[in-house]
Amino acid sequence: MVRLFALTRGRARPVGDGFFDLISMISLADPAVRDPFQPEPVLDPEHQAILDLCVDGPLSVAELGSYTDLPVSVVRVLLGDLDDAELIHVTQPVPLAELPDERLLREVINGLRAL
């Protein structure tokens, strides 16, 4: 049994500017994109578990938390480490400001119904 703060080395936030929303999709990074001069990262078992889960396809941060039985706050810190090591690719959700207006969507639906 390891305390959660030991898994994150006492950190409460991911390294760098990594922000991981609950619905951010995490996938494995292409190994060819990785910097060849960067040393091979030393991975803890929890880091490796996250990478193993993403082998079959992208997973959300919430799914990774569920599958690893770790709190999402801990998963976010671990994902920050993996992102910093360029081992994962993060797809952020579309911001609400970029989503179409509800009024416009209703007009489209009404137009389709009129056909």
Image (spheres, rainbow, N blue to C red):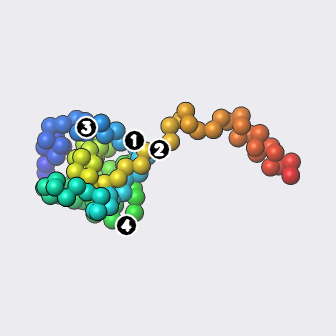
- Say left or right for 72 vs 45: right
Q: Nearer the viewer, mark 1 or mark 2?
A: 2
In the rendering, at what x and y percent does residue 57 appear? 40, 63
Q: Circle 3 is placed at which residue position?
A: 16
Q: Residue at x 74, y 39 (%)?
A: 106
> Contact, CB < 8 Å: mark 4 with mark 2?
no
Name the residue carrying label 1: 21
Residue 93 tag number: 2
Q: Residue at x 50, y 37 (%)?
A: 95
Front position among marks 1 and 3: 3
On the rendered structure, is 68 left or right of 36? right
**Chain-order first, disc 1 or disc 3:** 3
Q: Which residue position is annotated with label 4?
A: 56
Q: Which is nearer the N-term, disc 2 or disc 3?
A: 3
Q: Closer to the camera, 60 or 6?
A: 60
Whether residue 60 can be seen here: no
Q: Is residue 16 left or right of residue 92?
A: left
| Percent coordinates x, y for residue 3 in the rendering | 15, 44
Q: x%, y% of residue 56?
A: 37, 66
Q: Secondary structure at mark 1?
A: loop
Distance between the alpha carbons at the discs numbered 4 and 3: 27 Å
Q: Amino acid at mark 2?
A: Pro
Q: Earlier along the polypeptide chain: callout 4 or callout 3?
A: 3
Q: Are marks 1 and 2 in contact (CB under 8 Å)?
A: yes
